[in-house]
Image (cartoon, grey):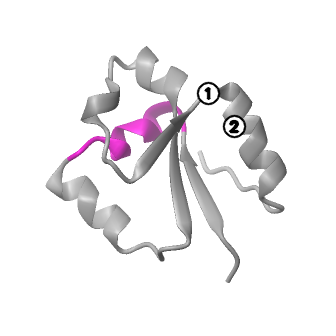
């Protein structure tokens, strides 16, 4: 399977907060899945970067566009 990425946006960013419950979600993913979280959505919810699980890379809207361009299939769940 090729590399994949998961970007958490809107209220999904809460799942990136460091906690035992959230950690269980991310440890089950294959190693080739890169995890991202949208900075503006963290800011809008008052979540600081130091509260986020180290597996995540925060990105801005420009980085969001880069991810869409880099990965051929894009799916969004509401």
Percent x, y for residue 51? 25, 33
Helix, strand, or loop for circle 2? helix
Task: Name the side, left or right, on which 71 lies relative to 6.
Answer: right
Q: Residues within 10 Å of mark 1 (few under 14, many from 20)?
A: some
Q: Which residues are magenta?
A: 9-18
Residue at (62% x, 51% y) in the render: 77
45 lies above or below 13: above
Which of the pair 11/68 is nearer the observer? Answer: 68
**To which residue does mark 2 refer?**
64
Q: Are marks 2 and 1 in contact (CB under 8 Å)?
A: yes
Task: Name the side, left or right, on which 20 lies relative to 4.
Answer: left
In the picture, the quarter occupied by the N terminus is bottom right
Which of the pair 8/50 is nearer the observer? Answer: 50
- Please say whether residue 15 is one of the residues in the magenta stretch: yes
Percent x, y for residue 67? 72, 47
56 lies above or below 14: below
Task: Name the side, left or right, on which 30 lies relative to 19.
Answer: right
- Please say whether residue 61 is one of the residues in the magenta stretch: no
In the picture, the quarter occupied by the C terminus is top right
**To which residue does mark 1 refer?**
60
Percent x, y for residue 52? 31, 39
Q: Residue furthest left?
A: 20
């Amino acid at each position: 399977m090729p590399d994949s990425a998961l970007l958490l946006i809107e209220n999904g960013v809460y799942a990136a907060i460091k906690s035992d419950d959230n950690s269980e979600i991310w440890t089950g993913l294959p190693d080739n899945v890169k995890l991202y979280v949208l900075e503006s959505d963290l800011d809008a919810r008052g979540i600081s970067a130091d509260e986020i699980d180290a597996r995540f890379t925060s990105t801005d809207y420009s980085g969001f566009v880069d991810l869409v361009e880099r990965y051929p299939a894009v799916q969004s769940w509401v």
